[in-house]
C-alpha cells in the first residue's frame, strides 16, 4: 500500500507573503488572514478557510508566513574561523585565515564546521544555500562537507571549487584529478539527492587562463553554473578577470558572479548583455573594506541579483541584516532614499530573486501551489519587532533570526516553535576541538 502524503496546515496566518503576484495582491502577492497547505514536499494550496482533513495543524494567528530565504553565496566551513582576522581587508583575511587552513581540514573538521553554519542558516530562515567550498580542500574534507549538507535538511547547491586563487593555494593538485573528483561528486553524491545540485567554482586570473578555460568547458559539459568571485577588491584588476572571462567564453546566463563591486559602465553593459547573474554580499563587503556594489545601475541594466551571507567574512548568519545593509549602502552612497532596492525589492531579492539567479524559480522562491514547500513563519509580536505599523517594512528593518519560529524545507520542519531540530550531539564541543587544531596549524603556518 502506498504511504499517504503528509500534510501540514499552517492556519489563520495574519499575513501570507506568497511572492507571487498571480496568487496574492501586489508585487509580493499578499494574502491576509489565510491558510497555507503543505502536501508532501510541495505547496498544496494557499487561501482563506482551506478545508483539509488529516493534516498536522500549525496555528499561525498573529504570524507572518513567507518563502524561505535563498542565500546565493556562502562558504559554510568558515564557521571554524569566526573571529579570525577581524581587522583585515580581503587579502589580509585570506592570508591570515582562509588560505592556510583550507588544505588542512580533516573530514570531521569540515563536517562540524558545515553543520554549525547550516544550523545558523536555518535559524535565520534560509532554506536554500549555495556553499562555495574552498578550492584547495582535499577530497576527504569535501566528503565531510557534502555529508553535513545532506544531514542538515537544507536545500543546497554545492559549488565544487576547481582552480586556485594563488599558486601556493593550489598545493600542486592536478587539474585532471580535480575534474575526476567533480564528475564523481556529481554522479555519486549530488545527483541521487533531490535536495542537492552542483555548481563549479573557480577564479578568473590571467596567469591561470588555461586552467580557467578547462574549468569553463567542464561546467558547460556537465550543464552546471560556473560560480566565481569578481572584482571584490579593486586590486583584483591586476588579474584581468574580465579579459579571462571573455577569452574563456564564460560570459552567459550560466555564469554566477559574487561581489562584482568595481565595475565600469561598459562592464555592467557587457554582463547585462550576456545575462550574467550576480550575488551581492553587503555585510562581507563592509567588513573586508571591499567597496559598495553599483546595485541601482545593475538593476537598471536588467541584471538579475540575489543576496548572500558570504561565510566567515560576516560571521553570524542574519538575512535581515543582509537586507538592511543592501538598502542602507545604496542610500548612503547616493544620498537618497528612493533608490534601488526598496523594502519590497530587497525582500523579493532575498527570496524569489535568489531563486531566479539560480534558475530554480520553477521550484522555489514563492509560495505558489506546486512549488517546493520551503516556508518560514515569523512572529511579529516579539519585543524587537512589534507593534505592527507596517509589517513588510518591519520584516526588513526590525526582524532578527530569533523571530523565526518555524522553518520548513520540503515540508519538513527544521525549526519548530523557535527551536532548531536535529542538532548533532556534542556539535559545539567538536567544533571547539576543530578550532583548537586549526589555531595550532595557523601557528605553524606563520
Ligand atoms: Zn565568497
Image (spheres, grey):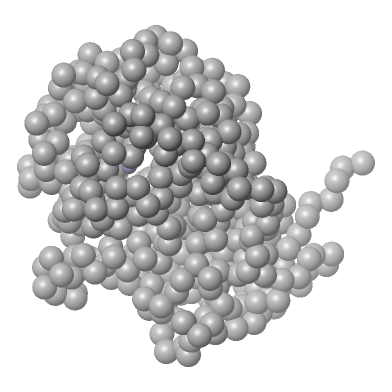
Picture coordinates of residue 217, whole percent (x, y): 33, 18
User: Position of 52 compared to 122: left or right?
Assistant: right
Q: Residue at x 48, y 42 (%)?
A: 435
Q: Quadrant of ligand 1?
A: top left
Q: Residue at x 28, y 63 (%)?
A: 326
Q: Is residue 107 visible?
A: yes
**Quadrant in the rendering for residue 6:** bottom right
Picture coordinates of residue 319, whole percent (x, y): 42, 61
Q: Is residue 33 above or below residue 407?
A: below
Q: Which residue, as the protein is rendered here, is positioned at the far right?
A: 1
Picture coordinates of residue 15, whole percent (x, y): 54, 78
User: Position of 193 compared to 263: left or right?
Assistant: right
Judging depth in this view, the residue of 264 and 77 nearest the camera is: 77
Picture coordinates of residue 397, whole percent (x, y): 36, 76
Q: Is residue 161 visible?
A: no
Q: Is residue 23 above or below residue 137?
A: below
Q: Residue at x 57, y 21 (%)?
A: 187
Q: Quadrant of the N terminus?
A: top right
Judging depth in this view, the residue of 174 and 204 nearest the camera is: 174
Number of numbered discs: 0
User: Position of 133 compared to 60: left or right?
Assistant: left
Q: Residue at x 55, y 56 (%)?
A: 122
User: Position of 262 compared to 93: left or right?
Assistant: left
Q: Quadrant of the C terminus?
A: top left
Amino acid at each position: 500500500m502506498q504511504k499517504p502524503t503528509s500534510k501540514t496546515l499552517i492556519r489563520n496566518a495574519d499575513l501570507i507573503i506568497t511572492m507571487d503576484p498571480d496568487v496574492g495582491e501586489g508585487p509580493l502577492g499578499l494574502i491576509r488572514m489565510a491558510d497555507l497547505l503543505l502536501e508532501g514536499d510541495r505547496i498544496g494550496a494557499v487561501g482563506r478557510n482551506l478545508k483539509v482533513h488529516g493534516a498536522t495543524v500549525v496555528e499561525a494567528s498573529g504570524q507572518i508566513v513567507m518563502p524561505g530565504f535563498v542565500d546565493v553565496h556562502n562558504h559554510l566551513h568558515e564557521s571554524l574561523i569566526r573571529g579570525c582576522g577581524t581587522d583585515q581587508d580581503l587579502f589580509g583575511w585570506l592570508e591570515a585565515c582562509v588560505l592556510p587552513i583550507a588544505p588542512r581540514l580533516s573530514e570531521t573538521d569540515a563536517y562540524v564546521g558545515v553543520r554549525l553554519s547550516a544550523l545558523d542558516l536555518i535559524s535565520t530562515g534560509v532554506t536554500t544555500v549555495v556553499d562555495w567550498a574552498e578550492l584547495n580542500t582535499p577530497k576527504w574534507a569535501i566528503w565531510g562537507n557534502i555529508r553535513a549538507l545532506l544531514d542538515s535538511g537544507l536545500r543546497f547547491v554545492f559549488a565544487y571549487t576547481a582552480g586556485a586563487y594563488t599558486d601556493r593555494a593550489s598545493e600542486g593538485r592536478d587539474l585532471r584529478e580535480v575534474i575526476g573528483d567533480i564528475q564523481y561528486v556529481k554522479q555519486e553524491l549530488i545527483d541521487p539527492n533531490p535536495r542537492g545540485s552542483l555548481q563549479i567554482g573557480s577564479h578568473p586570473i590571467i596567469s591561470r587562463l588555461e586552467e580557467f578555460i578547462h574549468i569553463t568547458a567542464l561546467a558547460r559539459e556537465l550543464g552546471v553554473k560556473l560560480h566565481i568571485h569578481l572584482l571584490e577588491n579593486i586590486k583584483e584588476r591586476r588579474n584581468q578577470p574580465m579579459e579571462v572571462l571573455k577569452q574563456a567564453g564564460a560570459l552567459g546566463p550560466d555564469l554566477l558572479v559574487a561581489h562584482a563591486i568595481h565595475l565600469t559602465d561598459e562592464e555592467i553593459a557587457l554582463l547585462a548583455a550576456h545575462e550574467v547573474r550576480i550575488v551581492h554580499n553587503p555585510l562581507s563587503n563592509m567588513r573586508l573594506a571591499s567597496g559598495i556594489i553599483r546595485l541601482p545601475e545593475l538593476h537598471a541594466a536588467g541584471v538579475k541579483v540575489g543576496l548572500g551571507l558570504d561565510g566567515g567574512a560576516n560571521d553570524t548568519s542574519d538575512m535581515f541584516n543582509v537586507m538592511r545593509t543592501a538598502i542602507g549602502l545604496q542610500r548612503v552612497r547616493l544620498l537618497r532614499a528612493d533608490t534601488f532596492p526598496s523594502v519590497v525589492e530587497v525582500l523579493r531579492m532575498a527570496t524569489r530573486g535568489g531563486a531566479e539567479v539560480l534558475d530554480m524559480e520553477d521550484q522555489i522562491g514563492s509560495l505558489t501551489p506546486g512549488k517546493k514547500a520551503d516556508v518560514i513563519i515569523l512572529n511579529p509580536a516579539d519585543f524587537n519587532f512589534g507593534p505592527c505599523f507596517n509589517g513588510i517594512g518591519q520584516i526588513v528593518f526590525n526582524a532578527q533570526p530569533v523571530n523565526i519560529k518555524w522553518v520548513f524545507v520540503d515540508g519538513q520542519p527544521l525549526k519548530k516553535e523557535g527551536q532548531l531540530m536535529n542538532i548533532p550531539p556534542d556539535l559545539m564541543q567538536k567544533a571547539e576541538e576543530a578550532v583548537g587544531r586549526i589555531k595550532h596549524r595557523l601557528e605553524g603556518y606563520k
